[in-house]
Image: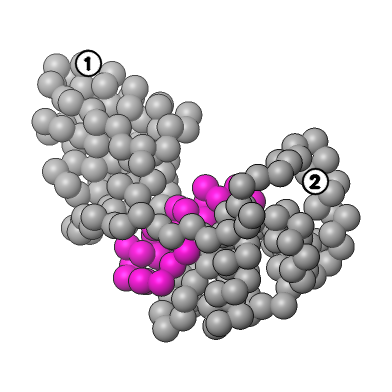
């Protein structure tokens, strides 16, 4: 292993879907970290998006433009936070995590690709109910 | 000596801590194993794949439970 540079990273910014939607409209790029099968079934629409599965971020992060604000999203937020901090370590400055993710995005009426029924099937057993975000 | 194990509390991270403590005990070496579970601090080492091991502020292993021989090498 090469020599390690330890960095004291700031807390990652968390953006709800409403704020994320506004940022995307202002030129931010959405990075969807979900597995390709999930992205193909149901995805974020109406925005500039790049799908990079979480497992591939360490190998593909150089594909991500440095000159744009980034919003990372996954199913739970945990992987998005991991990837966000990794990118911040690599020197990316405008990085945010979208929480909650696709379910709340759809609930807010923002555009999607694919069939929203796929989400209903997936979340039938674990509905998050009403939350405090995007209030 | 101090060895840091970076990980968010998964089974492999716990196994890594236990392995280092066991190998050190069997080798008669005094080791302090420090667990770092905060995502921000883990990422501060440039690590995404956990568990990872830090010896002397240098990442010496990441992405899996290390082999016992590898641990012995860190204790040397």
Q: Residue at x 78, y 44 (%)?
A: A123
Q: Residue at x 78, y 65 (%)?
A: A109
Front residue of this view, candidates B28 and A5: A5
Front residue of this view, candidates A124 and B62: A124
The percent coordinates of residue A32 (x first, y second) are 61, 65
Chain under callout 1: B
Secondary structure under tag 2 reads helix
> Looking at the image, is mark 2 or mark 1 nearer the viewer?
2
Name the residue tied to disc 2.
Answer: A122
Q: Residue at x 42, y 83 (%)?
A: A67
Q: Tell me, for residue A32, which label it has, or none.
A: none
Residue B26 falls in which quadrant of the image? Answer: top left
Q: Tell me, for residue B26, which label it has, or none.
A: 1
Task: Say few, some or many: other residues with alpha carbon within 10 Å of mark 1 (under 14 / 14 to 19 / 20 or more).
Answer: few
Residue B12 falls in which quadrant of the image? Answer: top left
Q: Are marks 2 and 1 in contact (CB under 8 Å)?
A: no
Tell me how far mark 2 sits from mark 1, CA to CA: 48 Å
Residue B25 falls in which quadrant of the image? Answer: top left
Task: Say few, some or many: other residues with alpha carbon within 10 Å of mark 2 (under 14 / 14 to 19 / 20 or more).
Answer: few
Q: Which region is colored magenta?
A: A75-96
Q: Is residue A72 left or right of residue A131?
A: left
Secondary structure under tag 1 reads helix
Q: Is residue A131 visible?
A: yes
Q: How many marks?
A: 2
Q: From this view, report whether residue A114 is shown above or below residue A83.
A: below
């Amino acid at each position: 292993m090469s020599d390690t540079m330890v960095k004291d990273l700031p807390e990652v910014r968390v953006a709800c879907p409403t704020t994320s939607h506004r940022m995307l409209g202002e030129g931010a790029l959405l990075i969807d970290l979900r597995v390709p099968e999930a992205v193909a079934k149901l995805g974020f629409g109406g925005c500039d998006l790049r799908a990079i599965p979480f497992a591939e971020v360490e190998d593909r992060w150089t594909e991500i433009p440095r000159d744009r604000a980034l919003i990372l999203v996954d199913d739970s937020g945990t992987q998005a936070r991991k990837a966000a901090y990794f990118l911040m370590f690599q020197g990316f400055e405008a990085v945010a995590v979208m929480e909650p993710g696709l379910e709340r995005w759809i609930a807010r009426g923002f555009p999607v690709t694919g069939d929203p029924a796929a989400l209903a099937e997936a979340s039938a057993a674990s509905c998050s109910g009403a939350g405090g975000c995007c209030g | 000596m101090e060895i840091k194990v970076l990980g968010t509390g998964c089974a492999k991270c716990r196994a890594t801590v236990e392995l280092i403590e066991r190998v050190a005990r069997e080798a008669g070496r005094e080791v302090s194993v420090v667990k770092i579970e905060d995502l921000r601090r883990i990422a501060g080492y440039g690590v995404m794949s956990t568990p990872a091991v830090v010896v002397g502020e240098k990442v010496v292993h990441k992405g899996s439970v290390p082999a016992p021989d590898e641990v012995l090498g860190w204790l040397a």
